Image: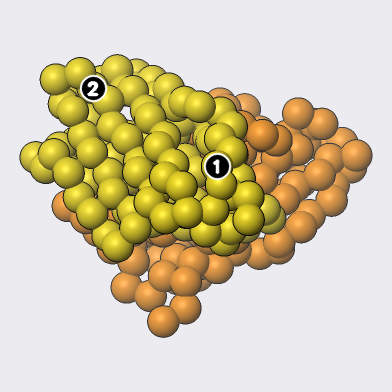
Chain colours: A yellow, B orange
């Protein structure tokens, strides 16, 4: 089955800096890669996603890149703000299910 | 447009009791997924259902766990004879249908087994 690894597990940045979170996956048949933001006590919120036929996608301060050959994808957040502080999860879709990474606790210090 | 709804938000059960978790998908969504999240871990897939059909239950324990998504009403995840190891957050997600990959999550049910 699919295996997704996510790094780093914790990330602390200063407000205004950029943050990068990286994930690798194992199943070459995976074709969809979403990123979720989870705040304490809440459900995961879909923030951006990318399909396997696209190399990069951007939505305001958030971007995702995908390298199918290397089987890795990354989340980039620019101009971070304190409200970006949360746990971020990457996932890969194989078949109908999503396989999640273990999460990255992002802290943005004012 | 209401999002995915789950209830109860918090559920406390004693060992050996039954837990019933409910999920109402977003309006117009016919696919439901259940995931379990242990403390400080990622989400683990349990089961994928469409109306009146279980499509993939390969992530669900063979014993004590069952799921349904009837023609009318919410999807139900049922855990019989709960044990302490069942304590976790259970999340439901929904998607519109085949060919649409996005899954939208509900707020979760936090199950505590005492």
Q: Is residue A78 visible?
A: yes
User: As drawn, is B32 to the left or to the right of B63?
Assistant: left
Q: Is residue A71 above or below residue B66?
A: above
Give me the chain letter of mark 2.
A
Q: Which residue is mark 1?
A: A13
Percent from the top left, x then y, of residue B10? 76, 57
- Circle 1 packing at 10 Å, graded few (<14), some (14-19), many (20+), is some
In front here: A65 or A100? Answer: A65
User: How many tags in the picture?
Assistant: 2
User: As drawn, is A32 to the left or to the right of B25?
Assistant: left
User: As drawn, is A105 to the left or to the right of B99?
Assistant: right
Q: Could you say which disc has been placed on residue A71 in the image?
A: 2
Q: Could you say which disc has been placed on residue B49 in the image?
A: none
Marks 2, 1: nearer the viewer: 1
Quarter of the figure with the N terminus of chain A: top left
Q: Is residue B91 visible?
A: no
Q: Helix or strand or loop: what does disc 2 sit on?
A: loop
Q: Residue at x 56, y 28 (%)?
A: A9
Percent from the top left, x then y, of residue B24? 50, 67
Percent from the top left, x then y, of residue A6? 45, 27
**Residue sticking out furthest to the bottom:** B1
Percent from the top left, x then y, of residue B21? 64, 55
Quarter of the figure with the C terminus of chain A: bottom right
Q: Residue at x 62, y 27 (%)?
A: B63
First-in-chain label (2 vs 1): 1
Q: Residue at x 47, y 54 (%)?
A: A16
Give me the chain letter of mark 1.
A
């Amino acid at each position: 089955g699919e295996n997704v690894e996510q790094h780093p597990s914790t990330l602390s940045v200063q407000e205004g800096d950029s943050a990068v979170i990286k994930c690798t996956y194992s199943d070459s048949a995976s074709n969809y890669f979403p990123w979720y933001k989870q705040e304490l006590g809440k459900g995961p919120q879909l923030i951006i996603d990318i399909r396997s036929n696209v190399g990069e996608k951007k939505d305001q301060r958030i971007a995702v890149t995908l390298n199918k050959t290397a089987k890795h994808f990354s989340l980039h957040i620019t101009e971070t703000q304190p409200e970006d502080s949360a746990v971020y999860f990457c996932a890969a879709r194989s078949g109908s299910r999503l396989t999640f990474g273990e999460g990255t606790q992002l802290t943005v210090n004012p | 447009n209401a999002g995915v709804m789950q209830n109860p938000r918090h559920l406390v059960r004693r060992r050996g009791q039954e837990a019933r978790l409910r999920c109402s998908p977003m309006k117009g969504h016919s696919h439901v997924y259940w995931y379990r999240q242990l403390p400080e871990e990622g989400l683990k897939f349990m089961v994928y259902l469409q109306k009146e059909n279980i499509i993939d239950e390969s992530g669900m324990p063979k014993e004590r766990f069952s799921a349904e998504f009837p023609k009318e009403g919410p999807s139900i995840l049922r855990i019989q004879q709960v044990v302490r190891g069942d304590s976790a957050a259970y999340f439901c997600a929904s998607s519109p249908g085949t060919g649409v990959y996005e899954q939208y999550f509900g707020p979760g049910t936090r199950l505590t087994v005492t």
